[in-house]
Image (cartoon, rainbow, N blue to C red):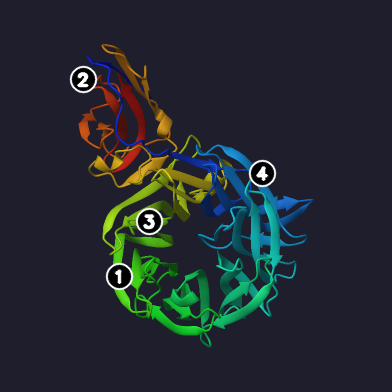
Amino acid sequence: MSQNWPIGFALLFACLCGQAAAQTFNLRYDPFANGRSETAFGVECAPDGGFFLMANGDWEENGLLFSSVVHSVRLDAFGNELGAYITHPPDRASYVGWSNTGGQLADGSGLYSAGSTKDTMGFNRPCLIEWSVEGQPTEIHEIAFPTSAIGRQAKQTPDGGFVICGEAVMDGIQGDAFLIKTDGEGNEEWTRTYGATNSYDYCVSVDFAPGGGYYLGGQRGSGPSSIDQWVVRTDENGDEIWSNNYGTPGGGDGLAQVTAMQNGDCVFASSWQTGSQFQQQGCIVRLDPDGGVLWSQRYGPVANAVLHTVQELSPSNDLIVCGAYGMVGNQYFGALLRTTSTGDSLWMRFYQYHDSLVSNGRGLFRDVVPTPDGGFIVCGTALPVSHADTLLYTQDVWVVKTDSMGCLEPGCHLITGMESQITNLKDVLRVWPNPVAQGGSVQLSIDLPANFEPQGALRLSVVSSDGRLVQEQRLPSLTSPTSISALEAGLYHLHLSDDTRWISGTRLVVQ
């Protein structure tokens, strides 16, 4: 469906001013085009302005099917794929962490991540994975462990070594969390385990505590109906200083994803059960170095909510968090949340995957990092909604790059009622000629996919580059002509939305 509008302007040339907008994009990657499932568990900024994705997915090689192999995707600053690489030890499946799985090496030579391997007998070994600066996997260091064990997250230590956290799999009913310290080559220096008897204890995150020790975050399960957020603080040798449970008493809360604050406090992102199963809200809890709760906040609607990564922003000390909310049935939306250092929400955005093949697709986010232009890049998975959808596309890597307000087109936060943003429909709104000269005629077209169903009336919003909502109007139908009154010279952001969702946007330069 399409619509064209003549738009008249009587304008004078002027220089564009104001802060440059962050580069944004939203893409689904099937890097090996083999119909296999893939997920990105970590994203990092590259020195050249591009990005690294740390991922894994199932793989077939020489007639053998591997449940997963580690791979990476290298992107430029605009989201174009520069390369995709695979590595795995012989006769081993391999996995890369859980969320925010690693980081950049301190010397700038590449990246590292926690992970694990699985042999043909189903035995898991924690491992340290390294990549070159180009994104090519270079080493997978398996680490001996007395039982089957899975590595979830790694941090590089000041001495050039690494710490890796995860959980040991005992008998399917109980298990212990662990922390492994290695040297710079991935050789084990010491291992510590944590947890209680007759409980299954997960550890999915680790960060640095004051005095050279560590914060560990995860989940302690004391029964099928009692799952607690769990945080442990250790000294520099991994010996436990304190261990505390948090969350809803007797409830089924989420995993504690910890990060250390610049002042030595610890925050964790998780989910908080508010009712029966799958009735949760995202939550953030801030702890002092002794484990005391400084504040606890809940965010968003009651849904099947999960938060996967929390990062502190410099110099504001704000927090940025990513995850997913199961809004309608089995339909997950990616979520981004920004708060102050005291937990007050600044904005929360939901992202729904949609392209020419996918109608109202599912998706979830695993990792988010701030970018040098003031925006954010977030990665995760785009998922089929139903079995029929698997004939069109598989579970693929999903990457979204936003500006500082979480917008795919600057100014989305000025649109009232906007709860979520649809990704990959940015090109359906086009304007030409662009730039437009004084007195010129501008044509605007909307070409929505045939499978797209607006939720309420469409509207067009015009936002100036300095953040003012200049005009907003309802579009009574997709065939009625409309017009935009004359605008002053400058840069404008045009937004197409319905009653609840941002659909598409583009930029218009008026000279």
Q: Can residue 325 be seen in this view?
A: yes
What's under tag 1, amino acid-wise? Ser
Question: Within 10 Å of the Cα at label 3, are there few (<14), some (14-19), or many (20+) other Cα atoms?
Answer: few
Residue 46 is left or right of residue 265, and the answer is right
Q: Is 89 situated above or below 287?
A: above
Question: Within 10 Å of the Cα at label 1, are there few (<14), some (14-19), or many (20+) other Cα atoms?
Answer: some
x, y percent for residue 203? 52, 73
Helix, strand, or loop for circle 1? strand
Q: Is residue 395 visible?
A: no
Question: Within 10 Å of the Cα at label 2, are there few (<14), some (14-19), or many (20+) other Cα atoms?
Answer: few
Residue marked by disc 3:
314
What's under tag 4, amino acid-wise? Asn
Q: Do the residues labelled 2 and 1 touch (CB within 8 Å)?
A: no
Residue 299 is left or right of residue 106, and the answer is left
Name which of mark 2 and mark 1 comes first in the sequence.
1
Residue marked by disc 4:
34
Measure the alpha-carbon separation of dots 4 and 3: 40 Å
